[in-house]
Structure formats: C-alpha cells, structure tokens
C-alpha cells in the first residue's frame, strides 16, 4: 500500500502515509503558557521554569510560548491598530499572536505562495517542498493534472522593481517546470493545458 501512494513533498513515504491519518500524537506541539497580563509584561512567572524543564524532559524540541489571553482579548476588542499600538507601547509588551502563528507555520512546515490578477491577490498555504504542480493543485485539482509551467516572481524582486512589467523587463520573471520546488513568498502564474490561471 505504501508504494502506491504518490509523494506529496520531500518527506519520506512513511511520513506521508502517517500524515493522511491526521494523528494528533504525530504532530509537533507548541505549548502556549497563559500568564496574567502583569506576568506577561514582566516576563516572569514562578511556574515557567518548571514547565520548561518538564517540556525539555518529556517533549524535547517542542516550542514554549508565553501568552496573556486577557491581554490578547483586550487587544482584539480595540477598534484600530493605532489604539492597539498605543496600548502595547504603554505596557512595554507586544501581542504574542505573530510569534504563535510564525512558530506554528515553521513546526508544521507550512509556507505561502501568492497568485494575483487585476482584481485580487490571494495567498495559498502549502507544505514546504511542494512542487509547482502540487502547489497549483491547491488552487484547483485540474491545474495539477494539466500543469504545463509556472511563471515565478520573487516577492523581494516585486518590491524592488515595483510592478510585474518591471520585474519582467529586468529578467527576473522565471519560467519553471514540474520539478520546481515552490519557495515561501513566490508569486506564481500557472499555465495549464486549458489556459493560464493566476
């Protein structure tokens, strides 16, 4: 049965089979330690060291992130970014959510690529080591089956040159085939047998 399953990433086949079972015990763990707002701001709590020692002994390599749920709830209830920024500046602490999201994506080997057209820009989340056809398949299954090539722009190139035409004029718009491994932040135009999908 294992030999019949296609590889979906650069992972070993055994890992691919286990991943189809959605076993919680096979997933990486991130320990979120809820602290009072006061303890979160001063970055101290009498239990943190004991928790870290336990995680290091029983679950080495797993991440520990302190968070103040009460503070996050206050921030979520604020109406503007300016209000949130002012509150964080007054406290001398930042929201833990960006770190939680970034750590979760790293632990689960998730990356993003983008598609864009005249009306919208869309982010797609995929597993690291996906090939261009596999990434196209997250947009629509037909794009994976009928994939011809991907035109790829790097995010940094788009920022540097300002628009797609300038990136293309600078020779930075690349045509990639079926073996191309998508990188985090790629902007991809998929050409498939039916036409071009953005």
Image (cartoon, rainbow, N blue to C red):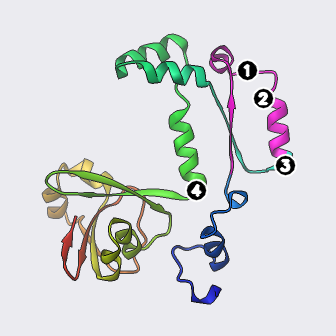
Q: CA distance from mark 3 to mark 1?
A: 23 Å
Pick the residue in front: 146 or 82.
Answer: 146
Asked if the residue under mark 4 is in contact with the one under mark 2, i.e. CB atoms within 8 Å, the reply is no
Magenta stretch: residue 164 in it?
no
Chain-order first, disc 3 or disc 2: 2
Q: Which residues are magenta?
A: 29-56
Q: CA distance from mark 1 to mark 2?
A: 7 Å
Q: Position of residue 103 (x, y in %)?
A: 58, 45
Going 37% across and 76% down the picture, which residue do you hit?
A: 133
Pointer 3 residue: 58
Q: CA distance from mark 4 to mark 3?
A: 20 Å
Graded by Cα atoms within 10 Å as few (under 14), some (14 to 19) or many (20 or more), the crowding at tag 4 reads few
Chain-order first, disc 4 or disc 3: 3
Pointer 2 residue: 48
Q: Which mark is residue 108?
A: 4
Asked if the residue under mark 2 is in contact with the one under mark 1, i.e. CB atoms within 8 Å, the reply is yes
| In this view, 187 is above or below 76 | below
Going 62% across and 24% down the picture, which residue do you hit?
A: 68
Going 68% across and 62% down the picture, which residue do you hit?
A: 23
Q: CA distance from mark 3 to mark 2?
A: 15 Å
Chain-order first, disc 2 or disc 4: 2
Q: Which mark is residue 44?
A: 1
| In this view, 123 is above or below 73 | below
Q: Position of residue 35 (x, y in %)?
A: 68, 23
Graded by Cα atoms within 10 Å as few (under 14), some (14 to 19) or many (20 or more), the crowding at tag 1 reads some
- Say whether residue 85 is left or right of residue 91: left
Chain-order first, disc 1 or disc 4: 1
Q: Secondary structure at mark 1?
A: loop
Chain-order first, disc 3 or disc 1: 1
Going 74% across and 51% down the picture, which residue do you hit?
A: 61
């Amino acid at each position: 049965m294992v030999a019949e399953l296609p590889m979906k990433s650069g992972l070993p086949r055994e890992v691919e089979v286990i991943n189809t079972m959605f076993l919680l015990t096979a997933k990486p763990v991130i320990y979120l330690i809820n602290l009072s707002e006061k303890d979160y701001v001063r970055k101290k709590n009498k239990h943190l060291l004991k928790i870290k020692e336990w995680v290091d002994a029983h679950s080495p390599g797993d991440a520990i992130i302190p968070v103040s749920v009460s503070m996050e709830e206050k921030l979520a209830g604020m109406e503007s970014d300016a209000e949130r920024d002012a509150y964080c500046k007054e406290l001398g602490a930042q929201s833990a959510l960006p770190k939680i999201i970034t750590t979760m994506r790293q632990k689960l080997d998730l990356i993003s690529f983008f598609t864009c057209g005249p009306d919208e820009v869309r982010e797609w989340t995929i597993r690291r080591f996906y090939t261009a056809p596999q990434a196209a398949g997250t947009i629509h299954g037909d794009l994976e089956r009928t994939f011809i090539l991907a035109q790829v722009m790097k995010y940094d190139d788009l920022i540097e040159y300002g628009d797609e035409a300038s990136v293309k004029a600078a020779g930075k718009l690349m045509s990639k085939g079926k073996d191309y491994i998508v990188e985090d932040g790629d902007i991809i135009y998929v050409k498939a047998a039916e036409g071009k999908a953005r």
